[in-house]
Amino acid sequence: MCGREGPVAERIAAGRAKGTAGEPATGGTGGARRLREGPGRLLVTLYGVFTVGAASRSVYQLSTRFEEAPLAYLLSAAAALVYAFITVSLVRGGERARRAARAACAAELAGVLTVGTWTLADPSAFPDATVWSDYGMGYLFLPLILPVTGLLWLRRSRAGARER
């Protein structure tokens, strides 16, 4: 026998029909796909762009100007890691990824609010801006809008999955 025939193939096919890791069947589209369709696709794209932007900016700044504003540059690197994690979670899909993305979006929102308030209250602590400085004003406030939108999308897509 050189193929997947018989009971093994049937179990594999049945596993796909039932979902994986205890997740319910999804009728072919899958929970992963629902997270990255419609508004989810825009979120994945924006988080991907922010990942590349924040990562490249922080790598350059950390390698060439670290002594000028270490806190700001390290926070930009942390933002890049959070963005990358959310991007991967949204692309991956599934219930565990949804919970991880929700926690990361909440942490991102807390970071934006904390750093945004800190940069306004004590501007001398940040000789150079971070992605989250002034609530993301240098990025059209997208760092503030993205986690809120992400949390709403994760909640809405979960509710939509339950209705099916």
Image (tube, rainbow, N blue to C red):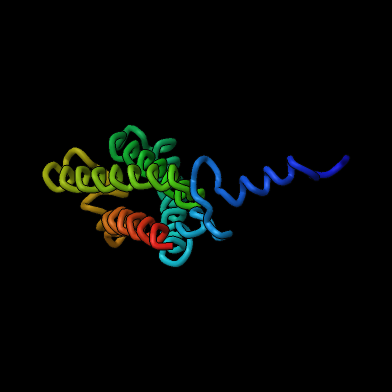
**Residue shown at the point (26%, 48%) measured from the top left:** 109
Q: Nearer the viewer, residue 132 or 150?
A: 150
**Residue shown at the point (40%, 44%) measured from the top left:** 80
Q: Nearer the viewer, residue 72 or 102?
A: 102
Residue 119 in view in this figure: yes
Residue 138 in view in this figure: no
Residue 105: x percent and y percent? 32, 48
Q: Which residue is at the far bottom?
A: 38
Q: Quadrant of the N terminus?
A: top right
Say if 156 sits above or below 54 in the image: below
In this picture, residue 97 sits left or right of residue 144: right
Q: Nearer the viewer, residue 34 or 84?
A: 34
Q: Which residue is at the far right?
A: 1
Q: Which residue is at the far front?
A: 7
Residue 160: x percent and y percent? 39, 62
Say if 133 sits above or below 65 in the image: below
In this picture, residue 114 sits left or right of residue 39: left
Residue 7: x percent and y percent? 74, 41
Total labels: the figure holds 0
**Residue shown at the point (32%, 39%) measured from the top left:** 75
Q: Which residue is at the far left?
A: 121
**Residue shown at the point (51%, 58%) measured from the top left:** 33
In this picture, residue 100 sits left or right of residue 92: left
Say if 120 sits above or below 38 in the image: above
Asked which quadrant contains residue 28, the reply is: bottom right
Q: Nearer the viewer, residue 113 or 106?
A: 106
Residue 79: x percent and y percent? 35, 43
Q: Quadrant of the C terminus?
A: bottom left
